[in-house]
Image (cartoon, rainbow, N blue to C red):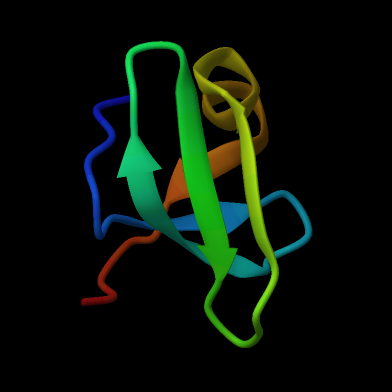
Amino acid sequence: MKLQTGALLVSRNGKQYRVVECYEDSISLMAVDGYTLFSCRRLFVEFSFRPAAGVA
């Protein structure tokens, strides 16, 4: 999955997250409907999230 800053992702439980920062080995995400901000490894994001379809 190609990830870039500003991309919108959807977790397995349907919650939406915005990509805040992208690095070679980690990605920072922020919940769209809240203030939760966290960083995780790229592999975790690719396994646990999918791109949001049709949402700008």
Identify whether 38 is placed above or below 25. below
With 48 as the anchor, is 32 left or right in this view? Answer: left
With 23 as the anchor, is 38 left or right in this view? Answer: right
State which quadrant residue 37 falls in: bottom right
Residue at 29 percent across and 75 percent down: it is 55
Q: Position of residue 29 (x, y in %)?
A: 52, 53
Q: Position of residue 54 (x, y in %)?
A: 25, 71
Name the foreground residue: 53 vs 21. 21
Residue at 55 percent across and 64 percent down: it is 30
Q: Position of residue 16 (x, y in %)?
A: 56, 69
Residue at 33 percent across and 13 percent down: it is 24
Identify whether 50 is placed above or below 29. above
Q: Quadrant of the C terminus?
A: bottom left
Give the tally of numbered discs: 0
State which quadrant residue 43 falls in: top right
Q: Position of residue 18 (x, y in %)?
A: 42, 63
Outermost residue to the right = 13
Residue at 39 percent across and 53 percent down: it is 19
Name the foreground residue: 54 vs 6. 6
